Amino acid sequence: MIRLKDVQMEYENGTRAIRGISLTIEDGEFVFLVGPSGSGKSTIIKLLTGEVEPSGGRIMINGYSVSNISERQIPLMRRTLGIIFQDFRLIEKKTVYENLEFVMRAVGASNKEIRNRIPYVLQLVGLEKKVDSYPTELSGGEQQRVAIARALVNNPDTIIADEPTGNLDPERSLELMSLLVKINQLGTTVVVVTHEKALVDRFGKRVITIESGHVINDSIGGYVGGHIHGKA
């Protein structure tokens, strides 16, 4: 579960990015986080991943309090999260398998866990035949699926995808979002930050709209013409 309670975020330069946001994302939900550039979406991602600390309020993520978490607990909290970035951030000199292995070894996984988990995750994202390929040998859509596999490989409770379709064409974007829905149906909480109104509209999931550091709408439905429609 993710819970934000009266969260404020003011950067050192005086920018007030978040102005008293409260929301809850239950285990197993699929949520789109939308809003214009500068609305505060990126700051929320940084808050959820522990990259920055809130200026005020409380954040709970999968049983951890971000506001007063100890240094030794931060890696444990981050292990409950899988992060998917727009720019993939794959290690070009490592194969697909080695990219996933690297992430698993970083959290102390055993050789047996690595041998069992990586083939399963690659099959889930449809890349079992690309196991020995290098990122430069893959299409943009395939690279993004490797990024999803990497986010999944340590079996996180929650996937956070930050503009995951930003570098993909509409057809690949739809494939990617369908894959995230499939992952959600297997029990993983999914939070997707996106500008892709057509995609949000198509899937009919919960949509949280941020504007000027506030939640201005939280509903089930679509994101149309800069506004949300659906039922509260």
Image: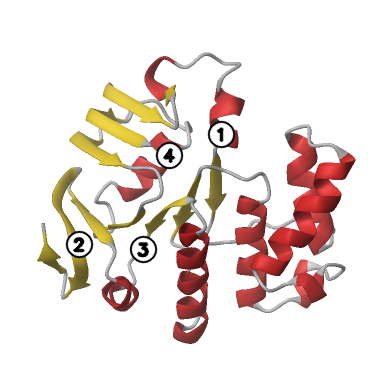
Q: Give 158 or 133, whichever is nearer the viewer.
A: 158
Q: Amino acid at mark 4?
A: Lys
Closer to the N terminus: mark 3 or mark 4? 4
Q: Earlier in the sequence, mark 3 or mark 1?
A: 1
Alpha carbons under labels 4 and 1: distance apart: 12 Å
- Residue positioned 28% across, 46% down in the render: 40
Say which residue label 1 marks: 78
Percent x, y of residue 128: 77, 71
**Mark 1 or mark 2: which comes first in sequence?**
1
Q: Nearer the viewer, mark 2 or mark 3?
A: 2
Quadrant location of the N terminus? top left
- The residue to which callout 4 is attached is 46
Q: Is residue 92 visible?
A: no
Kind of residue sitting beneath label 1: Arg
Give the mark nearer the N terminus: 4 vs 1.
Answer: 4
Residue beneath label 3, please? 194
Dot 2 surroundings within 10 Å: few (below 14), some, or many (20 or more)?
A: some
Q: Secondary structure at mark 1?
A: helix
Residue 220 shows which numbered tag?
2
Q: Of all residues shown, which one is farthest toward the bottom?
A: 171
Name the kind of residue labelled 2 in the image: Ile
Residue 97, image x and y in percent?
82, 59
